[in-house]
Amino acid sequence: MTDKQLVKSAGEHWVSSVLSRLGWAVALTRDGLAGTDILGVRTVTGQMIEVQVKASSPTKNPRFILGAKGCVPALTDREWHVFVALPAEPWDRARAFIVPRDHVAAATGISHMEWLTNPTAPPGTRNTPIGNARVDWRISARYEHRWDLLERLARDAPVMLPPRYREWAQEERVGLRPDHPWLGRLPNWDQEEISPDWQTWLLAAVT
């Protein structure tokens, strides 16, 4: 098993253990279901969730490789991503970001297009295809350890992406991908301010 596979497996099993402690009966799909690593059923209500796990090796600023699949919107109201930043020591607590698939799809597409079309970049220096798209943990920072969001339908979860992403979603040079459900009508956006140093980073480079 490769290091990449070990990291993925560690992330999936850690998420499964947390979900089990929270009252979800879980099963790993073992690549048997496209776009879903874990199926969960709430033991009390029978509610179902489909979770895709993206894990990162221990690093100060984890980034999660999503590629073109990261832009694919949800087909149901129960699809989620859990981004896992693994700790340096195996026994320490991991960090988790629980994000609806539609929010991830918006963030991935917006991040890549903003980076690709940023007017401050020297001409011809940015041509990486969407297949190499990545999302920095800070984009989903406000979803950290929001396991409570799984108790509701994904479409009802608050949009907690950076407010700047809402502006980029409405700009012609960035916008949303043609198949995204928010195209033409953006949902309400939680406009909580972010720290100045975080905002500086965000405006400088999002991917």
Image: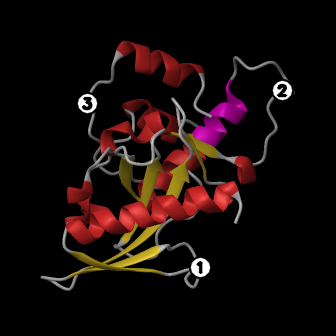
Q: Nearer the viewer, residue 168 or 111?
A: 111
| Rendered position, 38 above or below 17 | below
Residue 93 is one of the magenta-drawn residues = no
In contact (CB < 8 Å): disc 3 and disc 2: no
- Which residue is label 3 attached to? 192
At which x and y percent is residue 88? Answer: 48, 38
Whole-angstrom CA distance, mark 1 to mark 2, is 36 Å
| Rendered position, 103 above or below 138 | below
Whole-angstrom CA distance, mark 1 to mark 3, is 37 Å
Q: Secondary structure at mark 3?
A: loop
Q: Amino acid at mark 1?
A: Asp
Which of the numbered marks, if any, corresponds to residue 125? 2
| Rendered position, 172 above or below 101 | above
Q: Nearer the viewer, residue 8 or 136?
A: 8
Q: Which residues are magenta?
A: 111-118
Q: Is residue 178 left or right of residue 152?
A: right
